[in-house]
Image: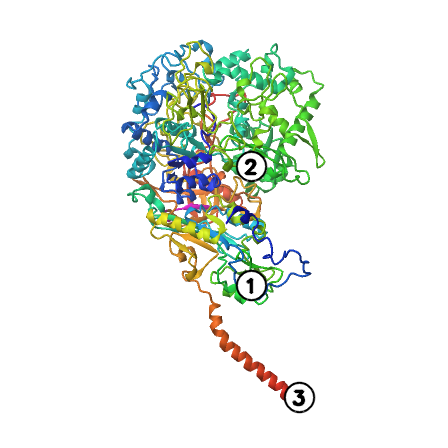
Amino acid sequence: MSDQQRILPGSGTTDPYNIEGREAPETRPLIPLGQKSYDGDQQPRMGFFTDTTVCIGCKACEVACKEWNDVPDTIGELTGNSYDNTGGLGADNWRHVAFIEQRKPIYLQENAHLGTPAVEGEPDFRWLMSSDVCKHCTEAPCLDVCPTGSLFRTEFGTVVVQEDICNGCGYCVSACPFGVLEQRERDGRVWKCTLCYDRTKDGLEPACAQACPTDSIQYGPLDELREKANGRLDMLVEAGASDARLYGANEEEYGMGAFFLLLDDPEVYGLPPDPEVVTRKFRSLWGPAAVAASALAAGVAAAFIGGNR
Amino acid sequence: MGRGGATTFQQDLANSDCIVDIGSNMAENHPVGFQWVMEARLRGAKVIHVDPRYTRTSAVSHLHVPLRAGTDIAFLGGIVNYILENERYFEEYVKTYTNAPTIIEEDFKDTEDLDGLFSGWDPESGSYDPSSWQYAGMTVHSSAGKREQGGLTGEQSSPGSEMGKLEGGLPPEMDETLQHERCVFQLLKKHYSRYTPEMVEQITGVDRNLFTQVAETICENSGRERTTSFAYAVGWTQHTHGVQNIRTAAIIQLLLGNIGRPGGGIMALRGHASIQGSTDIPTLFNILPGYIPMPHAHQGQDLQQFIDRAAPATGFWGNMRAYTVSLLKSYFGDAATRENDFCFDYLPRLTGDHSIYPAVMGMVDGWCKGFLVMGQNPAVGAANGKLQRLALANLDWLVVRDLYECETASFWHDSPEIETGEFKPEEIGTEVFFMPAASHVEKAGSFTNTQRLLQWRHKAIDPKGDCRSELWFMYHLGRKIKEKLSGSDDPKNHPIRDLKWDYPTEMENGVEEPNPHSVLREINGWDENNSALGSYLQVKDDGSTSCGCWIYCGVYANEENQAARRKPGQEQSWVAPEWGWAWPMNRRILYNRASADPEGKPWSERKKCVWWDEDNGQWTGYDVPDFSPSKRPDYVPEDDAQAEDAIRGDKPFIMQADGTGWLYVPAGLTDGPMPTHYEPEESPFDNALYGQRANPARQRFPRNDNRYNPSYGQPGSEVFPYVLSTYRLTEHHTAGGMSRTTEHLSELMPEMFCEVSPELAEERGLENGGWATIVTMRSAIEARVLVTDRLAPLLVQGQKTYLVGMPYHWGSRGIVTGDSANDLLGLVLDPNVHIGEYKVATCDIRPGRRPRGPVLVEFVEEYRRRAGAPERVEEFSRNLENQNGGES
């Protein structure tokens, strides 16, 4: 993708709110259900690659996200869970840095660069940090269950909630396999990462990626990010980090628009090891449901017809 | 080495082959700069973090080396010994670029001879006479540190005691073979001979194999082809031997040839936006802008006598008269003339240690009556918080300029002493003026960052309400004082009367705001035609030039604000010389002449930076050469040459009298020419190397309100068995004024906490997430507990030692509040720079919350009784009538 394209993504007819030569509609249109799936022909799908091996746990992503998106604070008590006082993703935390203290030899992290194994007296300890975010799934269950069209797929392939349309039904909350979606207590609506839709439309990278000092969070065309991530993974494995792996980069398992490079099992970071698209089952259920619905409709119609007699 | 600044820049860390982060927690406290450490790591560099705690920096380093707080010199001295014993030093570099071959006075005695003291110690005054530390055959002046040494007024370095001089640019007595028993190289070898891996393990708790691995990694990554860099911060400075911590790193880097070269150097990480700037143009009592020393109160000393005493005649300080005269011209303008010695007599004079802590005690004792606090929150941020607040409560007036009513402004109604009943608001006589301040986005000006880089900051929005910039406040304050004194003929008011104070102002948002560009231009200076100077080489000693800070000269060259340059890094070389402007003369790597060999050729292609261009007869390269541009590498000065002309063509350290990097410091330090391991003021251990336990020259203030915990060997030391250290978190900013007032930062670390190992938690019954009370002779505070493996116990001299770690960000104000860790610390200082030992003390810790109200005072008293403390301790009072002991 050229820089020019990156500067102006989303310009032109793919923007449902900014269709050249047409008058602006009086009310924002609902996104037709047919656009729920990402159309790869429109433009490259954009996403996040979070390389947790270079995360320094500074939480600049959390702060930048809240400042840019005007996300309310959630001041509570000290959790006692390492340096994590955010707890997890939710309506008021769209980025969450996990801190995992492990009694594992530090050289497993990346020490093989030093060319020597752990020496006697070296503490068997490592501290993993990882910035979690909405995965912007390839097949997003939240999208499938949203009855109002509040959740929609953008021209960047990301998944966004329109807060002025959300009716607070909460179906998406239980559909999300990652526990990302949550209703805000004070208004009942659902809020989550938009991948800074307002910034990406202006050719800016999301606030968290821009604030990240070590490029642990990278934003870009997903295919480029995946290629980069695979290169980085090879490097780590070669250096002896045999547990290193990508999470969410494989479309055949579970494709994510925000994927991760991890140094341990996903569950160590609080990520489900085998996320499931729960709504996939809906398709197989569609046939019987349709039959039942038809039968019901026919019955109702018959009752009315009968009543007229 | 000669200058008070980082020798390199953070971006250059990416060129390092090995980065040693020690005395700093760079990932947490300098996360933005840390990106270049991460980049170096991706390029294959080894990253080593040496720290008592396993921090976020350790988590992304290849190696974390846990060492006992306050034992850095033992660790680094061990590396010096490793380098010397295994002959790993860069021989050609060491022989030509350092003072290794120089022979020292016959009278000099090392700590090896005197069980932990150097020659010249005077127990009466508690200070050193450094004359026996001198070069043999000549007296050499320092280019930094204490310029006039010995007692209050520097009487010892009178011109009469000067002897000898450089011959052909070299000290008169040298041994190029490094074999003479009194040459610096051999003295160094002897001094560190007992700093073996076994001794390092005994003192620091670092496993000897781990230590050797670190030493070997550093050596492997130094030499012609490779370079290692060190990054330190207040983890080194805040000790009773803080200056010597840094000195030890300087010795290592000079021995390995890592100074003045890409990927090398010592990165001094400053903790605030313009801390470097506030020593360059100082807020300190003992230096003037550009590191010109403040004159002492001598009888009848004129400007020339001051210059002769305070600066070496050779090297760039040989031009000190030009720097000083031009500074006086910038202060006093036309009033400064040759006839009145350029108003030299208007400068205040030092009569002792006028640094902040003695002044705070002066407030308690009643002789210091007014206090103007700007950009600081001493009620939370300074050691011995109760003493600090006691001082505030005893003032006539207090002015606090801050973004918020911080604890220093609110002490009279909500300090912890109100709760304990020690203060009653109605009995506090201090008149408090709170002046709301504009934030950094609400005013224009320049910051000088950690790497000597001046960057212009544009104003984004107008300040709200009565908030004002510092510039507005200081300018109008000065203007009003001048107006008030305009009718006075009293000679004491003449300095104010004659002060040039003519900054143009502009109306901004209804406020008469001084033009910040005019201030930067005054700092840069101008010539007799009022044209901006281009560099300090143009600064004159005859009154024809004005220059507010000679090292900043050039920042307004060509009448352009060079600090405002913003050419992106991608559009220029890796040195990025067109982004902002760095002092001196936009040099990014100091002493970069050393990146070439004595003949002027790069040591290696991989590490080239500047070199001699024979065809054009000048130095050239990526960076601005830190050398006289056309001085040939084979230049040898005449014996009577002065200033820079006296420096040979193969001596890169041009600020120093002899042009070398000083492995051994013959003048300028108050506590010895070579760094020596001493225990902190408060330590559970004896000094394993010497009979002298702690730095003999450290500044102590034994007073009732500044009691010390008994240390090893003193009765009662068992009452405070644990080591305590204070530090910062990424989530908060220093004393909290800018973070505890911000929701999105407060929520990330919402409560004061302490960190302990599982073993200590077990020993003391502490629970993760529960409460603990931490006690010292000063106070007791409470904190939530984090039990973590990150604070591993260390085995020291056969005994397990535990660390209690505490961030110090909390106070009584703001969105999130908590007890202040600094309330626990006593005031005990480094004798060179008067910085407090914030990084290590001893304490006790117990489960549960602290007592509240008056019971808290009784609780601490009980601890004092248990520790066998006398009812009253010797009073230390430093009022003007009762001076003793000089500056140390």
On screen, residue B42 above or below B545:
below
Residue sitting nearer the eye, B540 or B69: B540
Q: Position of residue A243 (x, y in %)?
A: 35, 53
The residue lying at 50 percent from left, 43 percent from top is: B856
Residue topped by disc 3? A308
Amino acid type, callout 2: Asn
Which residues fall within the magenta stretch? B753-759
Say few, some or many: other residues with alpha carbon within 10 Å of mark 3 (under 14 / 14 to 19 / 20 or more). few
Say few, some or many: other residues with alpha carbon within 10 Å of mark 1 (under 14 / 14 to 19 / 20 or more). few
Say few, some or many: other residues with alpha carbon within 10 Å of mark 2 (under 14 / 14 to 19 / 20 or more). many
Residue sitting nearer the eye, B293 or B868: B293
Q: Position of residue A139 (x, y in %)?
A: 48, 63
Q: CA distance from mark 1 to mark 2?
A: 56 Å
Give the quarter of the image for residue B655.
Answer: top left
> How many labels, in total?
3
On screen, residue B226 above or below A62:
above
Which one is earlier in the sequence, the residue at label 3 or at label 1?
1
Amino acid type, callout 1: Gln
Closest to the camera, between mark 1 and mark 2, is 1
Element assignment for label 1: helix
Residue topped by disc 1? A35
